[in-house]
Image: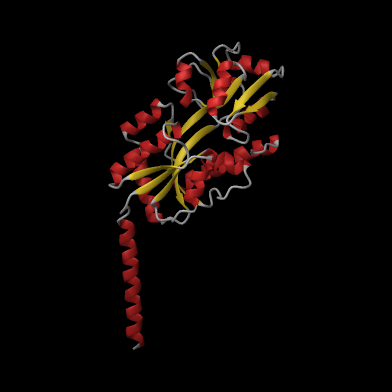
Amino acid sequence: MQKRDFFRRAGTFVAAALLASLAHAAYPEQPIKLVIGFPPGGGGDLYGRTIANELARRIGQPVVVDNRVGAGGNIAAEVVAKAKPDGYTLLLAMSGNMGSSPAIRSNLTYKVPGDFEPISQLVETPFGLMVSATSKIRSIEDFVAVARQGKLTYASTGTGGASQIVMEMVKQQAGLDILHVPYKGSGPAITDLLGGQVDSFFAPYTPLMGQINGGKMRLLAVSSARRVPSMPNVPTLKESGIDVTMTQWYGLAAPAGTPKEVLETLTRHVKAALQTPAVLQVYRNDGAQESTLSGAAFRDFIVRDIANYRRVVERGNLKAE
């Protein structure tokens, strides 16, 4: 009797394991939701929708974009951190909600990377140091010289945001004294930059290429490790004597606890999507560079990014709004 009971339970266990394996093998069986923390039309939304469309084509299920706007992408991260870890709710992770925010905000309702399973990085875009085209500052050397006289201001998209923290990196590395002028978003900051109310703006430049190419703004330097191929005459900060290399990045993440098999399936399809000419064209046309860091390597990158931001925050005693 005991032997029959043993084999019955063993059979039940094997059947359950087989069913679970088949369930994972069948993933995905329903539409996937990609939560993006920015409104339609912006750079982050463009990167997210581009990969969503290609993923949908490859996996045979719709990948529906859910724009959860607010708090620099933190609201979107909160939604995904609390979602069921089944692979059907993903986050467009980025250097704000997964880098600068964890470094400066103590009141976040989610933990990075603990509440997430990093899937794959998608793209990186440099920050750019910009001035109005009417400014007398025409080079990074001019900028440093005027800044050392204590006569410069810089705009940011808000106290505690990535644009402030990265400019603080520049100030700390070069020993510059530049007055911070926070704005509620890039729109009013750009308006005042063009109007001469503020001297400079350090932020991801790709959304501003229209103003740069149109002769309204001047890009002095970029924060990438190498010059941007489409703008070979614009130097990097590092080659200009300011040892700062920092990028704004975007990637995909799932809630912690998402099954390994599901993560492997998503990672495989994302890597393939990032080799698709149509996807690469969209990203590169926007000045972004694709990146294929995935899994543990992507997690390690996120940890280092937070640490880089945190050092600047602590050294400058910076506070979030």
Q: How is the image coloured?
A: secondary structure
Residue at x-position 57% and y-position 16% = 195
Dividing the picture into quadrants, the one containing residue 282 is: top left
Residue at horizontal 49 percent and vertical 36 percent from the top? 249
Which residue appears farthest toward the bottom when viewing the image? Answer: 1
**Residue 168 visible (yes or no):** yes
Q: Quadrant of the N terminus?
A: bottom left
Q: Quadrant of the C terminus?
A: top right
Q: Foreground residue, 114 or 181?
A: 181
Q: Position of residue 111 (x, y in %)?
A: 56, 50
Q: Residue at x 68, y 24 (%)?
A: 179
In the rendered image, residue 121, in percent from the top left (x then y), is placed at 44, 40
Relative to 281, 214 lies left or right:
right
As displayed, is residue 274 above or below residue 88?
above
Q: Position of residue 198 (x, y in %)?
A: 62, 20
Total marks drawn?
0
The answer to whether residue 224 is seen in the rendering is no
Residue 115 image offset from top left, x and y in percent = 52, 52
Q: Nearer the viewer, residue 71 or 257?
A: 71
Residue at screen point 31% across, 57% down? 25
